[in-house]
Structure formats: structure tokens, C-alpha cells
């Protein structure tokens, strides 16, 4: 019996040594944590070679009955361990019944023959640890170990005491390794899901940036092209000035698109206010811009800059307005942007783009964006953001400037 236990321990040490050598050689990967399938459990059947050898040598009584029991045990063991690696199959009732049948065959062989047949208890422990999870695991391990100790003590006396220890270790270690393997797989799946979510979020961010950039830029180009067409017959010099502006807008758009692609674009409220004023002026819309309040943090200025850009573009494309007012007012707690026009009051942008996308951005930053037709005609857009401390260093411009401002600009 001591010889068999020593051989069993030596087999375990050999596998541990092999794993360490694989780690040192760099061939061990995260996918190697835990048995990938039931084939990894088959080599342990070699622990029953002593019983098979006794059958061949005629040292076992009723050899045909013992051979049949050995065949049934191996068949049940293989069936159970292969089903253990699929969660649905492992939790099925048929798997539990197969495990109970395996336990019955194990006890029958151990009680009937003893000696080397007691080594089937650790094999039963491996199958039990592969199938059971949660609250059933510990009681099953203790019950199986105690049963192995009682049967081994009755058949071989104290020499079989190690069988109980080997059975308990087989149950707990197998369950721990397989549970760790499943946890690693779940973590890997979660990581992949998070990566896919991050990619989708980045795609959404990029699509919004591209929508705002191209929508505004193309609107500016169209408006200035129309102004060029109107001015060319009577004022060639003014028309050439508009053409020069179209060239500048195109170059600036290329720069902004490159920056948006690389993900480093930081909007400037002051720049967007200037562009909005220029766009409205070119479209023949009177622009009034008012600013007041403390300096803005770069993130706040960038978000409000996007709102100004989108709203000014919508005024030119949809409102048919003659006057547009843009007011930025800040307090110690919140910053408010109000844009109104005297147009026809028709909403702008399709669902899922434009102002709706900006509303999602502001909501993520703790702010809000509302819009709708004004009671007395026209359309209004209101954006509010909480005040955050501006980052040190040079500010992004007057809108995020270096002190309180209170100014009004009209064309």
C-alpha cells in the first residue's frame, strides 16, 4: 500500500515538475491554466494499473467479475469527466446519476477486493471534484474521504489510511483548478466584452466628431460659395475675398479632421464663437455674441464650443433667421450657453445625431442640453455644465481665459 501511495505522489510531482519546466521554457500560456478538456483527466486512470495487473496474473478472485467492474468503472469515469467540462452537461441530472453510479461501482470493487482496488477512491475523488461546485463540494469531499478511510481500514488496516487523504486532496484540488480555469475564461470573456464596448464607444465618439466637423465646415463652404456667386457680378474684389475664405476653411477642415482621427482635438469656445459669427455674417444673419462670468475649464469650453458649432450650422441650414443671439453666462457653480434665433422654429438634426449626440456628451459630463421652438417664434438651444477648476498653464483662449469677461459683439 505504501508503494502504491508513493507511486501516486510521484506521478503528481512529475506533472508539477513538467508544468514548471513549461513555464521556464516560455511555453506556458494563460490558456494552459486548468485542464482544457476531459483528456487531461484520462492519464490518472493509470492509478488502476495495479488492479489490472492482478487480474492478468490471476491474483484476483472472480476475475471475470473484477474485469467487468474495471470496464464499467473506466467507462463511467470517462463519461463523467468529459461531461464536467461543459457547464450545461455538468449541471444536468444525468451527470449526477453517472457520478452516483461511479461511486457505487467504486465502493463495490473496494469492498469486494480491497488492496490495489482501493486506489479507485482517489479516482472517484477526481471525478467528484470535476463535477461538483458550491455548497455540495465540501460535504461530498468529507463524506467520500471518511468512507474511503472506513473501507480501507476494514480491508487493509492502517496501511490504507493514506487513501482517505489522497481522496480528499483529489476532490479539493481538482475542484480548485477547474474553478480557477473557469474564472480565467470568464475574466477573459469579460475583458473581450469591455474591449468591444470601448471600440464601440470610440466609434460613436469619432462619428459624432466627424458629423460636427463636416456638417459645420461644408455649411460654411456652401454659404461662402453662395456669397461669392452673388458678389462676383458687381464686386470682384469682395468675391475673391470670399474665395480666399473658402480656401482657408478647407485647409482648417483638413487639419481638424486629422486631429479628430488621432483623437487629440481640443475645441476652443473662443474660436468657435468667431467661426459662428463669421458663418452667420456670410449667410446674412445678424450675430450677437455676449460673454460673462469666470474663466472656463478647457473641457467645459470644448463642449460648449461643439454646441456653438452645431447650433450655428443649424441656424444657417434650417432656420431662415435674420438674427441670432449667442450668450455665455457663468456663475461660481454652473456655466450656461443660450442660443436663440428669430427663424421659423423648425428643429434641426435627425434623431441620433447633431443636438441629440451633444446632449449625450453633456449628460456624461454632468450637464444638460435642451432645445425647441421659442414661444414667440424662432428656435432656442440651452446648454448647462457644472464649473470645474481650469487646468494650470495657458488657457485655450478668451472663452477659457484668464479672468472674468463681459463683452458683446455684433457685426
Image: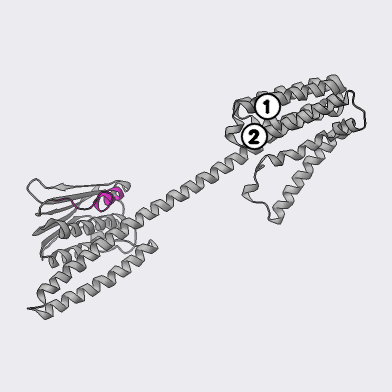
Query: Viewer-proximal residue, 245 or 304?
Result: 245
Label 2, residues with CA under 10 Å away: few <14, some 14-19, many ≥20 = many
The N terminus sits in image quarter: top right
**Foreground pick, 58 / 15:** 58
Q: Residue at image x 13%, y 56%?
A: 319
- Residue density around tag 1, few if under 14, some if 14–19, many if 20 or more, within 10 Å: some
- Is the image coloured rainbow, by chain, by secondary structure, or in one colour? one colour
Residue at the extreme bottom of the image, as rendered: 237
The spot of residue 272 in percent (x, y) is: 23, 62
**Which numbered tag is attached to residue 98?**
1
Secondary structure type for disc 1:
helix
Q: Nearest the camera: 410 or 354? A: 354
In the image, is residue 350 part of the stretch drawn in magenta?
Answer: yes
Image quarter of residue 297 = bottom left
- Is residue 153 positioned above or below 221 on the image? above
Q: Which residues are magenta?
A: 346-361
Is 236 rendered above or below residue 340? below
On residue 114, which mark appears?
Answer: none
Left or right placement of residue 379 versus residue 92 in this view: left
Residue 153: give x, y in percent of width and height.
Answer: 83, 21
Looking at the image, residue 165 lies above or below residue 379: above
Direction from residue 401 to residue 241 in the image, left or right: left
Q: Earlier in the sequence, mark 2 or mark 1?
A: 2
Q: Give the position of the C terminus as an image quadrant.
A: bottom left
Q: Are marks 2 and 1 in contact (CB under 8 Å)?
A: yes
Residue 349 within the magenta-colored segment of the rendering: yes
Q: Which mark is residue 83?
A: 2
Q: Residue at x 13, y 66 (%)?
A: 281
- Distance from disc 2 to disc 1, alpha carbons, whole Å, reads 10 Å
- The answer to whether one can see residue 278 in this image is yes
Disc 2, SS: helix
Amino acid at each position: 500500500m505504501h508503494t502504491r501511495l508513493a507511486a501516486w505522489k510521484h506521478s503528481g510531482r512529475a506533472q508539477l515538475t513538467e508544468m514548471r519546466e513549461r513555464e521556464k521554457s516560455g511555453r506556458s500560456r494563460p490558456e494552459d491554466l486548468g485542464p482544457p478538456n476531459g483528456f487531461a483527466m484520462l492519464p490518472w486512470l493509470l492509478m488502476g494499473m495495479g488492479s489490472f495487473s492482478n487480474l492478468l496474473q490471476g491474483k484476483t478472485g472472480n476475475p471475470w467479475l473484477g474485469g467487468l467492474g474495471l470496464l464499467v468503472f473506466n467507462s463511467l469515469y470517462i463519461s463523467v469527466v468529459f461531461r464536467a467540462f461543459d457547464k450545461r452537461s455538468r449541471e444536468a441530472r444525468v451527470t449526477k446519476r453517472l457520478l452516483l453510479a461511479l461511486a457505487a461501482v467504486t465502493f463495490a470493487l473496494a469492498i469486494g477486493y480491497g488492496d490495489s482496488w482501493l486506489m479507485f477512491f482517489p479516482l472517484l475523488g477526481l471525478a467528484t471534484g470535476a463535477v461538483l461546485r458550491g455548497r455540495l463540494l465540501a460535504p461530498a469531499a468529507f463524506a467520500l474521504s471518511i468512507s474511503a478511510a472506513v473501507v480501507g481500514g476494514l480491508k487493509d488496516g492502517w496501511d490504507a489510511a493514506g487513501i482517505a487523504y489522497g481522496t480528499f486532496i483529489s476532490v479539493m484540488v481538482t475542484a480548485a483548478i477547474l474553478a480557477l480555469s473557469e474564472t480565467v475564461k470568464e475574466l477573459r470573456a469579460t475583458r473581450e466584452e469591455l474591449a468591444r464596448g470601448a471600440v464601440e464607444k470610440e466609434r460613436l465618439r469619432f462619428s459624432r466628431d466627424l458629423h460636427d466637423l463636416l456638417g459645420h465646415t461644408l455649411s460654411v463652404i456652401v454659404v461662402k460659395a453662395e456669397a461669392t456667386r452673388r458678389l462676383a457680378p458687381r464686386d470682384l474684389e469682395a468675391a475673391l475675398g470670399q474665395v480666399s475664405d473658402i480656401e482657408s476653411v478647407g485647409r482648417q477642415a483638413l487639419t481638424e479632421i486629422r486631429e479628430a482621427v488621432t483623437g487629440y482635438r481640443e475645441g476652443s469656445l473662443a474660436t468657435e464663437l468667431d467661426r459662428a459669427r463669421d458663418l452667420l455674417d456670410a449667410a446674412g444673419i445678424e450675430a450677437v455674441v455676449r460673454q460673462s462670468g469666470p474663466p472656463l475649464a478647457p473641457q467645459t469650453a470644448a463642449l460648449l464650443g461643439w454646441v456653438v458649432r452645431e447650433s450655428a450650422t443649424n441656424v444657417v441650414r434650417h432656420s431662415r433667421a435674420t438674427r441670432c443671439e449667442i450668450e455665455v453666462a457663468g456663475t461660481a457653480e454652473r456655466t450656461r450657453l443660450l442660443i436663440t434665433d428669430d427663424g421659423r422654429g423648425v428643429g434641426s438634426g435627425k434623431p441620433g445625431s447633431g443636438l441629440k449626440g451633444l446632449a449625450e456628451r453633456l449628460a456624461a459630463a454632468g450637464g444638460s442640453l435642451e432645445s425647441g421652438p421659442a414661444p414667440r417664434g424662432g428656435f432656442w438651444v440651452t446648454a448647462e455644465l457644472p464649473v470645474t477648476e481650469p487646468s494650470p498653464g495657458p488657457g485655450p483662449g478668451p472663452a477659457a481665459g484668464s479672468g472674468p469677461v463681459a463683452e458683446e459683439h455684433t457685426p
